[in-house]
Amino acid sequence: IRIVENLLSITRIGAQGDTKVTKTLAVAEEVIEGAVAKFTKRGNQLPVHVHLPQEVLLVPMDELLIEQVLLNLLENAQIHAEGATRIDITLEKHDTMARITVEDDGAGIPPEEVKTLFDSSAHQSQQGDNKRNMGIGLSVCKTVMQAHDGSIWGENAKKGGARFVIELPMEEDTHENQG
């Protein structure tokens, strides 16, 4: 199901003829809660702790695609975060961006893989379905974030575990080239 959802997300973006998506103002907290609810319904065992700011963050986005990005990151933590006991999701305003951090307390990302996390071809050659799924899911996440004029990166947290960060612009770019 997860692979099909990822492929449909890519197809949906590609069918529009470019890498832009139709965005509407959404409450970022509600999108996070939707992803956590789906993650929990699928029987995942790691508890998720959500940390939200006092203010409501309205962010232009395709809610379903951003929810899929968050769901991919949560499921990757469930599958790949060896020794993890929890996942933390934090939403915060960072300058003109909404920043969502998904962090686990597991073993972290092998240092040799950090630079190729979002390159599906680098992970497809590895053995085992779990590693292939990570590559497919993260490449979808990168495509979705690019389509939103946002960014995504992964790193090892200083206190241990993996940290994935997505940033979405809080306002539409009104100076985009319309041609």
Image (cartoon, grey):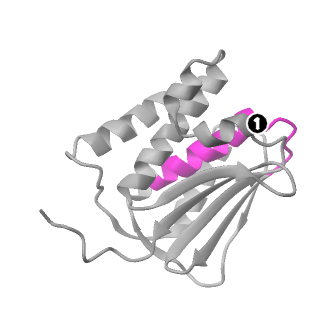
Farthest-out residue, left: 179
Q: Which residues are magenta?
A: 66-86
Q: Residue at left 32%, top 64%?
A: 23
The reply to whether residue 1 is visible in this rendering is no
The type of residue carrying mark 1 is Pro
Q: Residues within 10 Å of mark 1 (few under 14, many from 20)?
A: few
Q: Nearer the viewer, residue 13 or 28?
A: 13
Image point (76%, 36%), residue name: 110
Q: Position of residue 12 (x, y in %)?
A: 30, 42
* Image: 70 above or below 6: below
80 is within the stretch colored magenta: yes
Q: Is residue 160 left or right of residue 6?
A: right
- Residue that appears at 65% across and 84% down: 54
Indicate left or right for 149 with 158 as reference: left
Position in image of residue 57 (x %, y %): 52, 77
> Is any atom of residue 78 visible in this view?
yes
Q: Nearer the viewer, residue 31 or 99?
A: 99
Q: Quadrant of residue 165?
A: bottom right
User: Is 125 one of the magenta-colored residues?
Assistant: no
**Dominant secondary structure (helix, strand or loop) of the stretch shown in magenta:** helix
Where is residue 124? Give x, y as percent: 55, 21
Q: Secondary structure at mark 1?
A: loop
Quarter of the figure that contains the C terminus: bottom left
Q: Nearer the viewer, residue 88 or 135?
A: 135
Image-quadrant location for residue 93: bottom right
* Residue 90 % position (x, y): 68, 66
- Relative to residue 63, is residue 113 depicted above or below? above
Q: Residue furthest bottom?
A: 55
**Residue under label 1:** 110
Q: Which residue is pictured at 67% across the width and 42% down the height?
A: 114
